[in-house]
Image (tube, helix red, strand yellow):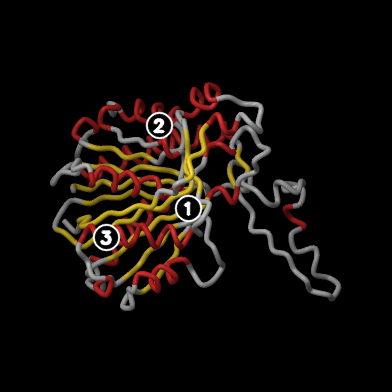
């Protein structure tokens, strides 16, 4: 059946708690306004760790939880849309600091869909026979991308990291991945190069997008069309969920556990209604963490694992969407 088994989990949750009331001290907003629209009460911000350092902590916790020697890891797949450096990659930094000298290293960026993409990728590597154990780490430092004068979106996001260690297993596994290329309309955050080239003729390379990114804020911070993202998210999650359970030959009422991307409670509730999934089978930590992009799902997996709530054979669907626009679902039996 060419599936995978999660043999260990870990997470890193920054200690700094920022509540909705904290936002009300510098924005025209309130706890009630934010919570009723998003389901978020608080989020965690990293004040003393870089992105790769959060990833290292989550990875070490997953290694300890699984009883895995770092030298047993054949591949590290790290998902992030907030890397610390263009190079070295955050996965290479994680490899160094956890002592996984035998591991190959890959960073991927499908934004909030990143962990789902990585799980699908890991399963393919495992079943080639080239890898026995793979570490997947999803780490995000989204506070660096926020425009804290934008009262429509800056309170949505938090920082953190989650990790799992996986190996091949004779279990069912099905996936559905896709994308709908977004031409800087729904959700984007620019990489802003600053050149000190003294010669003439090097300043017009971005002229094709200047009519879109026409303010300093649009060139520096995350920008989002909330309504467009909402429409895409509900449709994409519903569609990919339907496709992946059809591949698995099950129906929505057979599913024991659904872990959706933690973007907004309204999105989650609308999508689950469309999927015919009772919310008692849906796991969320949005209220306490906000949207931590690709780190959302592995963080929840670690919470469930350490609480003894991940049971052998549970029919589980991971489903999400992200900037790009990307989307995906994975069906697996634990």
Number of marks: 3
Mark 1 highlights which residue?
140
Indicate the quadrant where residue 117 lies.
bottom left
- Between residue 260 and residue 152, name the one nearer to us: 152
| Mark 1–mark 2 distance (CA, rounded to whole Å) | 21 Å
- Between residue 273 and residue 132, name the one nearer to us: 132
User: Is label 1 in contact with label 3 (beta carbons under 8 Å)?
Assistant: no
Q: Residue at x 36, y 74 (%)?
A: 104
Q: Earlier in the sequence, mark 1 or mark 3?
A: 1
Asked whether residue 4 is in view, the answer is: no
| Mark 2–mark 3 distance (CA, rounded to whole Å) | 27 Å
Q: Residue at x 16, y 59 (%)?
A: 169
Of helix, strand and loop, which one carries label 3?
strand
Query: Is the residue 23 above or below the residue 161 in the image?
Result: above
Apparent side of residue 87 relative to residue 28 in the rendered image (left or right): left
User: Is label 2 in contact with label 3 (beta carbons under 8 Å)?
Assistant: no
Q: Position of residue 12 (x, y in %)?
A: 38, 52
| Mark 1–mark 3 distance (CA, rounded to whole Å) | 18 Å
């Amino acid at each position: 059946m060419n599936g995978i088994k999660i043999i260990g989990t870990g997470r890193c949750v920054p200690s700094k708690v920022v509540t909705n009331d904290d936002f009300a001290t510098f924005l025209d907003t309130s706890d009630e306004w934010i919570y009723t629209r998003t389901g978020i009460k608080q989020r965690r911000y990293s004040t003393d760790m870089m992105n790769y350092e959060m990833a290292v902590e989550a990875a070490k916790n997953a290694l300890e939880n699984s009883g895995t020697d770092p030298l047993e890891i054949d591949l590290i797949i790290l998902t992030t849309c907030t890397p610390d450096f263009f190079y070295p990659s955050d996965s290479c930094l994680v490899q160094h600091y956890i002592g996984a000298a035998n591991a190959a290293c890959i960073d991927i960026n499908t934004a909030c869909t990143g962990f789902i993409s990585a799980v699908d990728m890991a399963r393919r590597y495992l079943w080639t026979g080239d890898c026995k154990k793979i570490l997947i780490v999803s780490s995000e430092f989204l506070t660096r991308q926020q425009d804290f004068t934008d009262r429509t979106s800056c309170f949505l996001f938090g920082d953190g990291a989650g990790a799992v260690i996986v190996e091949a297993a004779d279990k069912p596994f099905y996936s559905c991945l896709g994308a709908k290329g977004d031409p800087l309309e729904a959700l984007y955050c620019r990489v802003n190069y600053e050149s000190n080239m003294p010669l003439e003729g090097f300043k017009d390379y971005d002229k094709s997008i200047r009519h879109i990114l026409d303010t300093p804020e649009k060139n520096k911070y995350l920008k989002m069309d909330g309504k467009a993202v909402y429409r895409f998210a509900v449709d994409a999650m519903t569609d990919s969920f339907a496709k992946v359970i059809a591949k698995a030959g099950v129906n929505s009422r057979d599913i024991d556990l659904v872990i959706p991307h933690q973007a907004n409670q309204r999105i989650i509730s609308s999508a689950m209604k469309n999927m015919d999934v009772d919310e008692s089978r849906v796991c969320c930590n949005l209220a306490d963490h906000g949207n931590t992009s690709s780190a959302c799902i592995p963080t929840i997996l670690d919470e469930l694992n350490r609480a003894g709530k991940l049971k052998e054979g549970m029919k589980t669907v991971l489903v999400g969407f992200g900037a790009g626009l990307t989307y995906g679902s994975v069906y697996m039996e634990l």
